[in-house]
Image (cartoon, grey):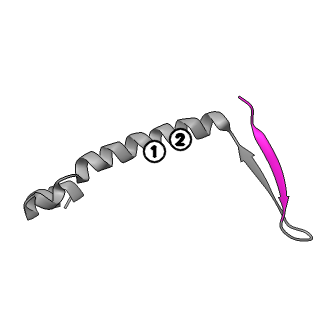
Amino acid sequence: MKLQVKEVNIGADERFVICFNPEAAERDAAVRGWLIAQLTAKIDGSDKLSVTKRAELRGG
C-alpha cells in the first residue's frame, strides 16, 4: 500500500493535509458498484408495483 499525502495551504495560517489510499479507493469503488447494482435491481419495474408492494420496498 502506498499512501499519498499532500499538504494544501488555504490561507496564511490554514492548511489541509489530504491523504489518498489507492487500495481503499479501489475497494470503495467496487462497493459503490455493488450497491448501485443492488439498488437498480430493486428499483427497476417498481413503478408497476401496487402501492402496498412499493411501501414494502421502502420499509413502510
Which of the two residues, 16 or 36, is positioned nearer the viewer here? 36
Figure check: 29 above or below 11: above
Q: Could you say where residue 5 lies in the image, as x and y percent from the top left?
A: 80, 44
State yes or no: residue 21 in magenta: no
**Label total for image:** 2
Q: Which residue is mark 1?
A: 32
Figure check: 23 above or below 16: above
Identify the residue at horizontal 30%, vertical 49% (top origin). 40
Q: Are marks 1 and 2 in contact (CB under 8 Å)?
A: yes
Residue 23 sits in which quadrant?
top right
The kind of residue tagged 2 is Asp
Q: Quadrant of the C terminus?
A: bottom left
Find the residue positioned furthest to the right. Answer: 12
Figure check: 50 above or below 35: below
Q: Start and end of the magenta stretch?
A: 1-9
Q: Could you say where residue 4 lies in the image, as x and y percent from the top left?
A: 77, 40
The kind of residue tagged 1 is Arg
Residue 34 sits in which quadrant?
top left
Identify the residue at horizontal 54%, vertical 35% (top origin). 27
Kindly state the secondary structure of the residue where label 2 is placed: helix
What type of secondary structure mainly makes up the magenta span?
A: strand
Find the residue positioned furthest to the top. Answer: 1
Identify the residue at horizontal 38%, vertical 44% (top origin). 35
Is residue 7 shown left or right of residue 35? right
State yes or no: residue 8 in magenta: yes
Q: Could you say where residue 31 lies in the image, as x and y percent from the top left?
A: 46, 40
Q: Which residue is mark 2?
A: 28
Q: CA distance from mark 1 to mark 2?
A: 6 Å
Q: Residues within 10 Å of mark 2 (few under 14, many from 20)?
A: few
What label does residue 3 carry, if any?
Answer: none
